[in-house]
Image (cartoon, helix red, strand yellow):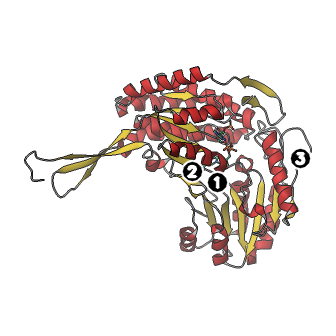
Amino acid sequence: MTYQSVNPYDGKTSKTFTELTDKELDTAIATAATCFETWRTTSFADRAVIVAKAAAIMHANIDEYARPVTLEMGKLFAQARGEVKLSADIIDYYAKNAERFLAPQPLSPATGEAEIVSTPFGVLFGVEPWNFPYYQLARFAAPNLMAGNVVMVKHAGCVPQCAIAFEKLWRDAGAPPGAYTNLLISYKQVDRVIDDPRIKGIALTGSVEAGQIVAARAGKNLKKSTMELGGSDAFIVLEDADLDKTVEWAVWGKMNNTGQCCVAAKRFIVVEPLADKFLAKFQAALAALTPGDPMDAKTTLGPLSTEAALVKLVDQVKRAVGKGAKLVMGGDRIDRAGAFMQPTILTDIKPTNPAFREEFFGPVALFFRVKNEDEAIALANDSEFGLGGCVFTADIARGKRVASRVDTGMMFVNHPTWTTPDLPFGGIKNSGYGRELSSLGIQEFVNKKLVRVSAIDAPA
Ligand code: NAP
């Protein structure tokens, strides 16, 4: 069964869901395509009323939306509440700003008049991951609905109740049938949707493997796609950094969402003078985390999303150790019910160890010691990924210089990572292409159409 709610805290299955038949899927696409014909001509102001209402409903019911997040994928409840609020903020941001972002842009041609106008593509299809069950959907849905597109989403199998709650949100906000559609469908049906001529653009957030499959299918159909994929973000610590504050941010950067963030700090790269002290303090802080019920405010270490994710991560750590990495702490499941993983630090990961190039999706930190800034940058760039990264230093100019030399889509100085509606999000290399959020995110699936006006008797 692909779509089921299993609580990773106790392993209990609360609900299972059946997938759509091909006929039901076809009807859903037809409804979306019909909806597009009226939605595309609906004014920004009228779309904004519905989109702003969706944001207001989320803001007014934070606990109600947060609960299924914690129950389906184990996020600490306080963090789930934060995600709901951020998702509502994103939706509201596009309700307020979309018209400005998509306003016609006048050009200054040598002759005549010209402008670029933005028109929607049509029905879009998103494939989304479980780690931020609403935030990822909000990033895709809100800008595109405001742009005049309509969206269909295949969400991850382990968060069906979040997927269904988000679809209901749009109905409750007054969106017409077909504006936002949740699809409980198989991988084979994902191919069918991508191939369908009524679908005009594809967005995927997830692993590199899924990205390669879905992007290839979109490419075969000559459909535009955006890919938000994995990462192995570097957390660079220079010798002039404030050690105590840096360690606090290191714990946050590693452990937010129990390490299951594409932009989690994954490779800790510390210059020699601070390396031992950093490692000791970081280890002590991770050891102090308390596993427990993610609904309980006292819990600081939640379970991983699923038992399968835990088994995969423990095995990945064991393979890394088998190839020569050293375990400073952790490395195994916690001896209790639920999908709990010990906070783990690995050192001595040589470039010949496959772990050197892998993404560890959970509470596992790879620790590297380097001689200086140049070595730190070279190591940060020695990765197939290019999503985010950060540098800690007392010298902001130096931080910006380092940031400019690291090959990623996002760099942060004195903070592990950050996302707000008005900051663009996305990566390069195997971390994907395209951007979500900010004014950039709304431009991905609109036609930038040139309209030129000449006097009819003007010379050619
Ligand atoms: P995943 O296995 O790739 O799943 C993501 C989505 O793709 C799910 O809906 C999944 O469906 C679907 N999917 C997987 N294989 C597919 C296939 N062959 N055909 C059609 N659909 C397919 O990734 P995950 O493990 O859930 O998420 C973690 C990954 O996402 C990490 O690598 C993380 O870094 C990345 N991520 C990136 C960003 C970003 O913005 N760059 C944000 C969040 C996460 P099922 O659930 O049904 O398998």
Q: Are marks 1 and 2 in contact (CB under 8 Å)?
A: yes
State whether label 2 is within 8 Å of ligand 1. Answer: no
Q: CA distance from mark 1 to mark 3?
A: 25 Å
Looking at the rendered image, the quarter that the N terminus falls into is top right
From the image, tell me which residue sits under label 3. 334
- The first of marks 1 and 2 along the sequence is 1
Task: Find the residue positioned furthest to the left.
Answer: 457
| View quadrant of ligand 1 | top right
From the image, tell me which residue sits under label 2. 419
Residue depicted at x 40% and y 41% = 98
Q: Is residue 140 left or right of residue 439?
A: right
Q: CA distance from mark 3 to mark 2?
A: 31 Å
Residue depicted at x 82% and y 36% = 9
Q: Secondary structure at mark 3?
A: loop
Which mark, residue 428? Answer: none
- Closer-to-camera residue (305/82): 305
Q: CA distance from mark 1 to mark 2?
A: 10 Å
Q: Identity of the amino acid at label 3? A: Ile
From the image, tell me which residue sits under label 1. 263
